[in-house]
Image: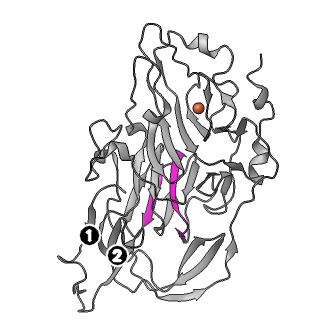
Amino acid sequence: MAYYYRLGDIPPKRHTQFRQPDGSLYKEELVSSHGFSGIYSNLYHIHNPNTVKSIGEPKPYKWEIAKDYGLKQTHLNTSKLETTGDDYLEARRVLLMNNDVNMAICIPKQRKMDYYYKNADGDEVVFVHDGNGYMYSQFGKLRVRKGDYIVIPRTTIYRFEWEEGPLRLLIMESLGPIETVKRYRNELGQLLEHSPYCERDIRPPGELVREEAKGSYLVQIKKQGYLHQYEYAHSPMDLVGWDGFLYPYALSIHDFEPITGRIHQPPPVHQTFQAWGFVICSFVPRLFDYHPQAIPAPYNHSNIDSDEVLYYVEGNFMSRKGIDRGSFTLHMGGLPHGPHPGTVEKSIGAKETEELAVMLDTFRPLHLTTDALAFVDDKYPMSWTE
Ligand SMILES: [Fe+2]
């Protein structure tokens, strides 16, 4: 959810005759959320979006929860990974999950997808840790760059084309819609003056790209633990125009303006998105607390009813030892966590930080998947003991 936007040609009034140069009607498609009560967009296709040529065998696509992992502060170190698979879907390796959200690392070898993908289960946020490229969808062509959060509403049909060079994606899949933070919005949805980012920072697709040739277009549809194989006679990218509030967009973590204070500010000041059962926050380069007696390192924290995940993007993580670029830490509810020994004193007098990290806090327990076990740092639970 962002703001009203339109691209291409649309009729002056919805649900009225809108004709192609040959006199035939454009095919209108309403893409709506929460039945008819949520945000929506109206899409105008050249061809009927239902022209299925064939339906292939569904491919299982699910992850298993690691049993009996226990209550442990956890460090998953994925920093050494060079690839996690050949293609975008195969390379998705979900490491943490619950019924509201899952988090995956994805480093595909193939830079171009030769099919389209649609997530019919939930919204996705793709954080581009490394990489530059384009996302193509019905809604148009979107330039995506290192540091972008790409917010992709469910049912968006898309594919990526990445440029050569390092590529590393952090993918969060959400059962509920990904939204801007409610307390930063006025009653009409506009982002307020105290919001760390505003509409100018939200980048929707810039231009429509049309594939008009008849042929064979595979759309892999993720739904209920399977990738359903749908072959269509026309490209999903056959729009002449669309308008509405529902569309994919990019927001760079570098456009998130940090909120700082005289004493340590709590994690909600870093909140970037909200969804059902979790929040996403951005830790960005910022000035440290400026009270003369301030302690810039965070205090110990007992998160009694949430699980906290930090994904370390860049910089020197002052309060943690043994953490690499590409590390995940999971601080489970029920145990206190805090700075590593020695880091509190060391932080005093520090003026600023260059750290960059993505945090995901859930309100229901997260589970490690069996795939995550290969990355567990066994020493981490004892790493506060001197
Ligand atoms: Fe915490």
| Kind of residue at badge 1 | Gly
Dot 2 falls on a residue whose secondary structure is strand
Query: Which residue sits furthest front?
Result: 304
Res 276 visible: yes
Pinpoint residue 73: horizontal percent, then vertical percent: 72, 35
Q: Is residue 266 magenta?
A: no
Q: Nearer the viewer, residue 212 or 64?
A: 64
Highlighted range, magenta: 116-137
Query: In the image, 318: left or right of 82?
Result: left
* Placement of 45 over or under 257, stated as above or below: below
- Which corner quadrant of the image does residue 259 belong to? top left
Mark nearer the N terminus (1 vs 2)? 1
Q: From the image, tell me which residue sits under label 1.
A: 8
Marks 1 and 2, how far apart at CA: 8 Å
Mark 2 within 8 Å of ligand 1, using the beta carbon: no
* Placement of 334 over or under 27, stated as above or below: above
* Placement of 268 over or under 318, stated as above or below: below
- For image coordinates 58% across by 48% down, the residue present is 170
Q: From the image, tell me which residue sits under label 2.
A: 239
How dense is the environment of label 2, judged by Cα within 10 Å: few (below 14), some, or many (20 and up)? Answer: many
Q: Is residue 127 magenta?
A: yes
* Placement of 216 over or under 79, stated as above or below: below
Dot 1 falls on a residue whose secondary structure is strand
Pinpoint residue 381: horizontal percent, then vertical percent: 77, 31
Q: Are marks 1 and 2 in contact (CB under 8 Å)?
A: yes
How dense is the environment of label 1, judged by Cα within 10 Å: few (below 14), some, or many (20 and up)? Answer: some
